[in-house]
Image (cartoon, rainbow, N blue to C red):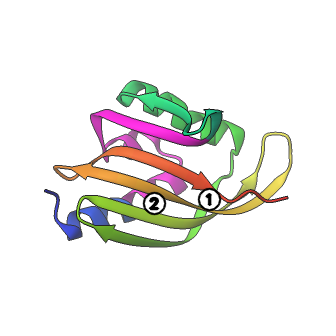
Amino acid sequence: MTDRQTIENALNGLVDAFNAHDLDRIMTFFTDDCVLQMPRGPNPFGQRAEGAVAVKATLATRFEGIPDVHYGEDSHYIDGNVGVSKWLLTGTTAAGQKIAVRGCDFYEFRDGKATMKDSYWKIVE
């Protein structure tokens, strides 16, 4: 069981690391057997990456697709080993489109590190 303060520190650290676009620091918050589910993809769960190497490669696409991505207005909620991070993602896509979208990440933790990150975005039309 991971204690509440450890999860809160991890959620805050993850936002900081994502905003610094620091993949190596981001990965320090994940287990080697972690799973990432992106909001878009060919399946109902989006695109899934399994294992730290695959998760890191998939997260790199976020910075390639939205080079100036920023997660702001963040807030966090914790229940047991689950942490939820809500945020406003802003940035400009590689194609030059400005975006602002609310979303959230559901994390599952084991021994202070994330084993799962499941991301959701609002659809802005």
Q: Secondary structure at mark 1?
A: strand
The one of 21 and 54 positioned closer to us in this rendering: 54
Q: Secondary structure at mark 2?
A: helix
Q: Which residue is mark 1?
A: 70
Instruction: Specify few, some or many for label 1: CA neighbours under 10 Å numbering under 14, 14-19, or 20 or more.
Output: many
Q: Position of residue 45 (x, y in %)?
A: 54, 39
Q: Is residue 121 above or below residue 38?
A: below
Q: Residue most toward the left?
A: 1
- Stretch of the chain drawn in magenta: 13-39
Residue 8 has which mark? none
Instruction: Specify few, some or many for label 2: CA neighbours under 10 Å numbering under 14, 14-19, or 20 or more.
Output: some
Q: Is residue 29 magenta?
A: yes
- Residue at x-position 70% and y-position 45%: 66
**Rendered image quadrant of residue 24:** top left
- Residue at x-position 72% and y-position 56%: 91
Type of amino acid under label 2? Asp
Give the Cα distance between marks 2 and 1.
10 Å
Assign the C terminus to one quadrant of the image.
bottom right
- Residue at x-position 64% and y-position 34%: 41
Q: Position of residue 78 (x, y in %)?
A: 32, 69
Q: Residue most toward the front?
A: 44
Q: Position of residue 35 (x, y in %)?
A: 39, 36
**Considering only order in the chain, which callout, 1 or 2, is on the residue closer to the N terminus?**
2
Q: Which residue is mark 2?
A: 16
Q: Is residue 111 left or right of residue 43?
A: left
Whether residue 109 is visible, yes or no, is yes
Q: Is residue 45 magenta?
A: no
- Residue at x-position 68% and y-position 60%: 122
Whether residue 20 is visible, yes or no, is no
Q: Is residue 122 left or right of residue 78?
A: right
